[in-house]
């Protein structure tokens, strides 16, 4: 098996595992919106499509904590050409009012930002679980938005009001 067919097999396996997170009995919910497998003919016809190319996966997370449990939030998972040896980049496409997400949708997840945490065996399911866990359990010590973190800590009622308004305005369908 060539390295590129091994990379393709890993990508297919990872996407299949992500699809399982949409099952009703899944503890963490992720709805796959778009993956490199959606148009395999186009992917296969591109020169170097199986190696040396980054891939993008779009999907919606369904957090369980209030007020985020009232909507879904689309994230983009960018797999670098070196995946799984380098971690993916994850960003929110849907705006979310949260101390650990900046204005551009960037998120700081320990699993992705530490050479000690990321291993080639880390699955995309683990990545999605880490993102959902961070949304459900904010880490104020690692906030990307200091103003929202301060509000979360010192004026929780105001934070809850703004977060709920944002969820109602920007949140996506959970179906």
Image: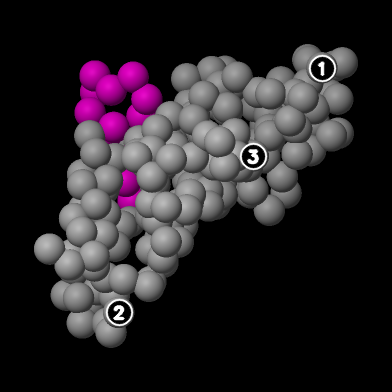
Magenta region, main secondary structure = loop
Whichever of callouts 1 and 2 sits on the residue coming sooner in the sequence is 2
Of labels 1 and 3, the one closer to you: 3
The residue that appears at 43% across and 40% down in the rendered structure is 119
Disc marking residue 137: none
Question: What is the CA distance from the residue labelled 1 to the residue labelled 3?
Answer: 18 Å
Which quarter of the figure is the C terminus placed in? top left
The residue that appears at 80% across and 31% down in the rendered structure is 148
Of labels 1 and 2, the one closer to you: 2
Provide the residue designation for mark 1: 153
Of labels 2 and 3, the one closer to you: 2
Provide the residue designation for mark 2: 48
Which quarter of the figure is the N terminus placed in? bottom left
> Can I make out residue 30 in this image?
no
Q: Nearer the viewer, residue 100 or 11?
A: 11
Q: Is disc 1 surrounded by few (<14), some (14 to 19) or many (20+) residues within 10 Å?
A: few
Q: Nearer the viewer, residue 170 or 7?
A: 7
Question: What is the CA distance from the residue labelled 2 to the residue labelled 3?
Answer: 31 Å
Q: Is disc 3 surrounded by few (<14), some (14 to 19) or many (20+) residues within 10 Å?
A: some
First to last magenta residue range: 21-33
Vertical relation: 21 (above or below) 67: below
Q: State the SS at label 2.
A: loop
Q: Please, which residue is most extreme toward the left here? A: 1
Q: State the SS at label 3.
A: loop
Q: Pinpoint residue 132: horizontal percent, then vertical percent.
A: 49, 29
The residue that appears at 32% across and 46% down in the rendered structure is 32
Q: How many marks?
A: 3
């Amino acid at each position: 098996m060539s390295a590129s067919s091994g990379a393709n097999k890993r990508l297919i396996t990872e996407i299949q595992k992500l699809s399982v997170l949409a099952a009703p009995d899944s503890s963490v919910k992720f709805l796959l919106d778009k993956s490199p497998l959606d148009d395999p003919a186009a992917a296969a016809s591109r020169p170097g499509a199986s190696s040396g190319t980054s891939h993008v996966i779009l999907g919606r997370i369904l957090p369980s904590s209030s007020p985020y449990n009232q909507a879904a939030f689309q994230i983009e998972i960018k797999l670098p050409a070196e995946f799984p040896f380098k971690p993916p980049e994850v960003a929110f496409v849907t705006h979310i009012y949260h101390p650990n997400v900046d204005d551009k949708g960037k998120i700081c997840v320990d699993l992705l930002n530490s050479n000690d945490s990321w291993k080639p065996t880390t699955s995309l399911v683990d990545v999605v679980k880490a993102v959902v866990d961070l949304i459900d359990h904010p880490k104020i010590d690692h906030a990307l938005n200091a103003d929202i973190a301060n509000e979360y800590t010192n004026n929780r009622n105001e934070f809850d009001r703004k977060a709920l308004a944002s969820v109602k305005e920007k949140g996506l369908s959970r179906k």
